[in-house]
Amino acid sequence: MNLQNTLRDLIYMLFNLKNLSPGEIGSFLGILMKCGCDFFELANEVSRMALPIPLDLINAVFDLCPEPVKITDVKSQTIRALIPRWTSTKYHSGTITQVTQDIQEKILSQYNGLYAYHSNLSPRKLSVDDPYLLLINSKNARFLDINRRKVYLYEYASEEENHDSLSSV
């Protein structure tokens, strides 16, 4: 690695290092953001890495996200409203119905992971792609609209809230 390498190269090297803690990843990327790096570009780049990245390191990246808009339900209509543009090209991740169903199922099943959805991932780049990211962990689900720089948050009910609601019945 030398000074001729790009930030992309540096980020790939960072995630290839062994035994880095989530705090170290978060601190480094936080410094890059203070220097002007865009969170959404960083998040999109991490989602495209062909590396097995542990969920705790992915969460460290997404803990740096801007203030999210909270959503209170995961109905199909709610999820569809979070995706303002979806093309009908053959380069999308699926039809809009398939994508909203997939997002809904993953959130409801609390299937932990980072998932990417693309409206037009054309190799020829004639049209703009609209990438969306979904990060699910044990506490919440975050949905990111990369091009519009928006974050949406759905929080799962905690064990205490579930217990309190059952004890009041």
Image (tube, helix red, strand yellow):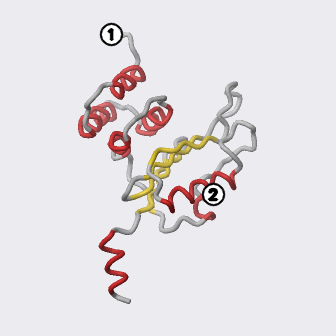
Instruction: Give the mark toward the camera: 2 or 1.
Output: 2
| Residue 101: image tag | 2
Question: Where, by quadrant of the figure, is residue 21 drawn?
Answer: top left
- Helix, strand or loop status at disc 2: helix
| Residue 128: image tag | none
Left or right of residue 55, residue 151 in this image:
right
What is the distance, in whole Å, between disc 2 and disc 1 at their CAs? 45 Å
Q: The C terminus lies in which quarter of the figure? A: bottom left
- Tell me the kind of residue under disc 1: Asn
Crowd around label 2: few <14 · some 14–19 · many ≥20 (10 Å): some
Query: 54 and 41: which one is in front?
Result: 54
Q: Residue at x 38, y 43 (%)?
A: 55
Residue at the disc numbered 1: 2
Looking at marks 2 and 1 on the same chain, the residue that comes earlier in the sequence is marked by 1
Residue 33, given in percent of the width and then of the height, sits at 34, 35
- Helix, strand or loop status at disc 1: loop
Residue 42, given in percent of the width and then of the height, sits at 42, 34
Left or right of residue 16, residue 82 in this image:
right
Question: Where, by quadrant of the figure, is residue 126 drawn?
Answer: top right
Crowd around label 1: few <14 · some 14–19 · many ≥20 (10 Å): few
Query: 151 and 55: which one is in front?
Result: 55
Q: In this view, does 66 lie above or below 40?
A: below
- Tell me the kind of residue under disc 2: Gln
Query: 80 and 126: which one is in front?
Result: 80
Q: In this view, does 168 lie above or below 13?
A: below
Left or right of residue 81, residue 29 in this image:
left
Residue 36, given in percent of the width and then of the height, sits at 36, 32
Q: The N terminus lies in which quarter of the figure? A: top left
Q: In this view, does 22 lie above or below 106?
A: above
